[in-house]
Every structure is written in structure tokens, then in C-alpha cells.
Amino acid sequence: MGGMTPEPPAETALPPVPLTVEGSSVLHQMMRFRRAAWRSLSPEARSSISHEAVDALAAMEKPVEGRQSAAYSMLGHKGDLMLVHFRRSFEELEQAQRAVAQLRLSDYLEPATSYLSVVELGLYESTSDTYAELARRGIKPNSDEWKTELAAVLDRHRKAMAPRLWPEIPASKYICFYPMDRRRGESKNWYQEAMTVRQRMMKEHGLIGRRYAGDVRQIISGSIGFDDWEWGVDLFAEDPLVFKKLIYEMRFDEVSAVYALFGSFFVGLKLPSAHLAAWLEPAA
């Protein structure tokens, strides 16, 4: 029809995906402890197995250049023990998973579920600014020059955000982990909203989290193509009530109220290696 602006060809259209930078590879392992089988062992056998596990966890929980693991005693029926591994690559995650499986204690741990993801920082504002600047300079989307410019922008963000991309696991007493999606329904579809609209909503969403910055540490990881949901969220705090207050308040903003779908929530207490042997022992 006359007067309508034709859609740009796909090869030169602006990508609808915000720029992201990625860091640590993350694996959550939720286990059930086979207590009856464990109790049937002799005290000497239990002691030998637990000491091996304590030594292994003690080595893994020390942060070394973005490589660290932590154990949590889970609350509720979804499992007994949660292991969280942060590594530099999926290959290193596989090594961590195999190291746990090779412990004699693994004979008494039954996998309940797991979650695979990569620490991700979305760059909505930088994406808009970068696209506008490239357009001002007459650089066509998806051209070789465009790709070179974006690579340079992402490299600067990776360097500036390195502490957030390769975080240490917080020493906080409590963890709350949950996966989530953005809605793709018939009436509301996050992925059909314009980039500017999504940017505005994410900015408003982030303002709530910043108010809790002193009470909770949040680590977001992306899992599209890696697991059943699109993102994983880890919250760490000294007071578990903070999880309830933060998530409840966030559900009133537009992003969560209209577009968010949540998976199961997993809550646990930090289980340092020094306390693992006592955790394993049968109650007197």
C-alpha cells in the first residue's frame, strides 16, 4: 500500500536480541541422600567415605580464578543436598560432575534434578546506544564492519564486568535458586515486543533489585539451548525472608506480572566442608 515503509531485508534488519556477555559456566546438582543405605554401613566405613568427601569438597569450595563449588542442605521434599559448581567452561563442569560421581559417597546420593546455565549479563541500554551510533555512522546491520564494531563493544564490556561475569559464590547462609521463562503466549509474547519496550521494562524491573542490593546477592545465568527454562536465578542472603520479600515485590512490576513464568524453587542452607561429616552422620 502507498505510504507504508517497507520492512528492511532480513540480512540488514536490526537483530531483536539484546547484546549479552557471558562468563562462568554453572551447574546445579540436586541430590537425595539414601539415608537407610548409609545407616546400614559400619561406623568405620561411614567415617572413611565421609572423610574422602570432606577433603574433596574442601578443595572444590576454594575459589580459584572463577572455579568454585559449594554445598547446601536443602529444605523440603525436592532433595537433601544441592551442589553448585562455577567453572570456566562446560568441559570443566563435566570434570566437576565426574569428580563428584567418582566419590564413594555418590553411591548414597541419588540425582533428583539438575540445571545447566552460563552467567549472563544483558546489555539492553548499551545495545540501543550502540545500534544508534552505528546507524549514525552509516554502518549497515550484519555487515562485516558491523560485526567487528559489536565484537569490540562486547570485549570492552567483558573487561569492565569481569567481577560479575566470573563471581565467587557468596558466603551467605542461604541460597534460593529457581529457573524462569518469558511468556510466549497467544495474547502476551515477550519476544514480539519491540527492543525499546523490553528495555524500559527491564530497567524498571532492575530498580527493585537494586533496593535489595545490601541484603541479597543475585546471579543471573542464561540457559536457552542448555536446559528446560530460559534463565536460572541464584539469590544469596543471610535472612531467607529477603527472598520472599524481593520476589513478591518484583511480581508487581510489568516484566514479572505479565511476562514471567517461574519453575520450581530450591532453598538451602550453606553446608561448608567442615560440617559435611556431621551432616552425614545418623542422628543419635
Image (cartoon, rainbow, N blue to C red):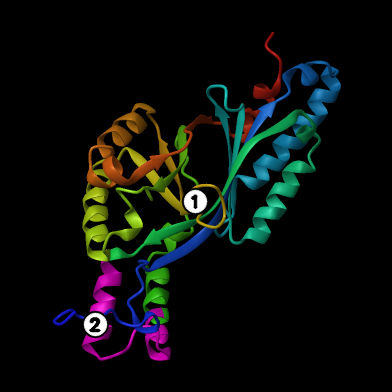
Residue reaching furthest to the front: 1
Q: Mark 1: give few (<14), some (14-19) or many (20+) Cα within 10 Å.
A: some
Q: Residues within 10 Å of mark 2 (few under 14, many from 20)?
A: few
Secondary structure type for disc 1: loop
Q: In this rendering, does residue 29 appear at all?
A: no
**At 80% from the left edge and 31% from the top edge, which residue is drawn?**
49
Estimate the x, y position of residue 28 in percent, counting from the top left: 58, 43
**Residue 229, horizontal then vertical, whole percent:** 49, 47
Q: Residue at the location (20% across, 80% down)?
A: 5
Residue in the picture at 25% in, 48% down: 205
Whichever of labels 1 and 2 marks the residue nearer the N terminus, that label is 2
Q: 268 or 132: nearer the eye?
A: 132
Residue 256 in the image: above or below residue 264: below
Secondary structure predominantly adopted by residues drawn in magenta: helix
Seen at 36% across and 77% down, the residue is: 153
Between 51 and 231, the one lying in front of the other is 231
Compared to 187, does 53 lie above or below?
Answer: above
Query: Which residue is the site of mark 2?
Result: 133
Q: Position of residue 180 (x, y in %)?
A: 43, 44
| Residue numbers of the magenta segment | 125-150
Between disc 1 and disc 2, the foreground one is: 2
Residue that protrudes farthest toward the top in the picture: 284
Quadrant housing residue 83: top right
Under mark 1, the amino acid is Glu
Q: Does the magenta-highlighted stretch encompass residue 110?
A: no
Rendered image: mark on residue 168: 1
Amino acid carrying label 2: it is Glu
Q: How many marks?
A: 2
Q: Quadrant of residue 50?
A: top right
